[in-house]
Image (spheres, rainbow, N blue to C red):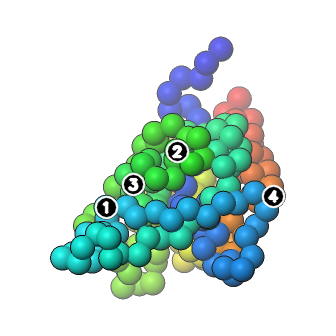
């Protein structure tokens, strides 16, 4: 029996930190990760009018096995990353993920005056009361308090180390949280 759309919680995925452990030392690569040099159009545009060939690509470390692990979780996967739609072009294929919905950020997204992570208000508005788990390396107490005060549904804000990326314990925590939500709906 298939689940009806919208019945699973959302899993909001950041790229840099959870999927790309960018804070690791360049000399050390966690097991299973490969390095990819990626030059998305947004990066080239940031350096315009410099010629594209002079723009240095991002060094992105990805673990292909994460795609299968993410797809096995009982969530609807959504990109919640500054990569925006480029995550579907450059990150998803390496992980074997299908095209995912993308939370679109306003063009003026930047640091909030109150210290809140710039994504937080937009995530709460986008989720519109639906249960969600959000994995990001920049989640802190300020974001947790904001979501608790402004989001009507259940939410898990799960911090992932930008030095280690998603690990087995993170997948276990996400699976348990989704199972608890499913049990609460019965």
Q: CA distance from mark 3 to mark 1?
A: 8 Å
Q: CA distance from mark 3 to mark 4?
A: 28 Å
Q: Tell me, yes or no, whether the two marked residues, 4 and 1, touch with CB atoms within 8 Å.
A: no
Where residue 21 appears, as percent x and y from the top left, is: 64, 69
Q: Residues within 10 Å of mark 4 (few under 14, many from 20)?
A: few
Residue at coordinates 28% horizontally, 74% vertically from top-left?
A: 46
Residue 41, numbered label: 1
Q: Is residue 16 above or below residue 133?
A: below
The extreme left residue here reads: 49
Task: Label 2, secondary structure: give it.
Answer: helix
Where residue 3 appears, as percent x and y from the top left, is: 59, 23
Where residue 175 appears, as percent x and y from the top left, is: 74, 45
Residue at coordinates 50% horizontally, 27% vertically from top-left?
A: 5
Q: CA distance from mark 3 to mark 2?
A: 11 Å
Task: Classify residue 48 by image quadrant.
Answer: bottom left
Q: Residues within 10 Å of mark 3 (few under 14, many from 20)?
A: some
Q: Tell me, yes or no, whether the two marked residues, 3 and 1, touch with CB atoms within 8 Å.
A: yes
128 or 38, which lies in front?
A: 38
Q: Is residue 4 visible?
A: yes
């Amino acid at each position: 029996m298939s689940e009806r759309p919208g019945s699973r919680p959302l899993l909001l995925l950041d790229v840099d930190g959870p999927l790309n452990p960018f804070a690791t030392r360049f000399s050390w690569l966690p097991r299973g990760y490969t390095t990819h040099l990626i030059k998305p159009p947004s990066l080239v545009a940031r350096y315009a009018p410099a010629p594209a060939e002079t723009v240095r690509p991002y060094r992105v470390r990805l673990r292909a096995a994460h795609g299968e692990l993410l797809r096995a979780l009982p969530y609807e996967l959504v990109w919640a990353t500054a990569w925006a739609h480029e995550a579907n072009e450059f990150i998803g294929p390496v992980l074997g993920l299908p095209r995912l919905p993308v939370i679109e950020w306003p063009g003026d997204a930047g640091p909030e005056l109150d210290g809140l992570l710039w994504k937080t208000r937009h995530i709460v508005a986008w989720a519109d009361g639906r249960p969600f788990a959000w994995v990001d390396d920049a989640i802190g107490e300020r974001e947790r308090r904001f979501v608790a005060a402004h989001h009507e549904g259940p939410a898990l804000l799960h911090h992932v180390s930008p030095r280690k990326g998603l690990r087995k314990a993170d997948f276990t925590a996400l699976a348990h949280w989704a199972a608890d939500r499913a049990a609460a709906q019965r």
